[in-house]
Image: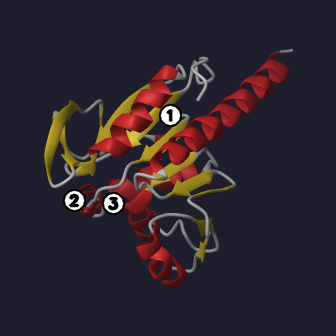
Amino acid sequence: MSVTKVLAGSKIAILVANGFTEQDKTEAQRALIEAGAVTKLVSPDAGLVNGWSGATWGHHYAVDAALSTALSADYDMLVIPGGQRSLDKLKLTAHTKRFINGFMAAEKPVVVYGDALHIMITTDNIRDRTVAGPAIMNDVVVQAGGHWAETPVHTENNLTTGSTDEDNRKALVTAMVDFFAGYATMRREKNAAVAA
């Protein structure tokens, strides 16, 4: 993965609640920061949010923005780590749907890690889309009106999804950075043309 600052000037929201998969969040955030992005943790939890690591609670991380007041317009891209506890909590607030749907409606890039596909189903963002993820979610996606990709990572329009098992997490992180970099480059070129 390139360490050039291909995401310089990009502000990326990472949507989590207590119990998110810590490895999803930390590996994504590290790669995004190395690429020059500014990352912000957005959460319904106030103050600190607690990761889940393996079979136990992990580290605490400072929340940068409250989900209840966060606006998709304030960010360029969105990352949603997996983690059943986090997803269950995110489903409890209507702000989750509002926030995610803001990115989807504006066709801003969204990357969904593993079982976070559940939140995309809850917010009705799977229908007629092809997605990848944990094999156990194949039937759930099809029942929600989506299509299943037989690949570890899949990108369709503004949505990248993928499996986060040990064999595939690095591929998803690399795909995420490339996906976001392509969008950032396109946005810079568009802004330069408008300014010219």
Q: Which mark is residue 87?
A: none
| Side of 27 where 90 appears, left or right | left
- At 59% across and 17% down in the image, what residue appears? 5
Q: Badge 3 is on which residue?
A: 94
Query: Is 126 drawn above or below residue 25 in the view shown?
Result: below
Q: Is residue 69 visible?
A: no
Q: Amino acid at mark 2?
A: Arg
Image coords of residue 150 (percent x, y): 61, 70
Secondary element at image label 1: loop
Q: Amino acid at mark 3?
A: Ala
- At 53% across and 19% down in the image, what residue appears? 36
Mark 2 vs mark 1, foreground winner is 2
Q: Which mark is residue 85?
A: 2
Q: Residues within 10 Å of mark 3 (few under 14, many from 20)?
A: few
Secondary element at image label 2: helix
Which of 21 and 79 lies nearest the eye of the viewer?
21
Image coords of residue 94 (percent x, y): 33, 60
Mark 1 vs mark 3, foreground winner is 1
- At 58% across and 65% down in the image, what residue appears? 131
Q: CA distance from mark 2 to mark 3?
A: 17 Å
Q: Earlier in the sequence, mark 1 or mark 3?
A: 1
Q: CA distance from mark 1 to mark 3?
A: 19 Å
Q: CA distance from mark 2 to mark 1?
A: 25 Å
Q: Badge 1 is on which residue?
A: 75
Q: Earlier in the sequence, mark 2 or mark 1?
A: 1
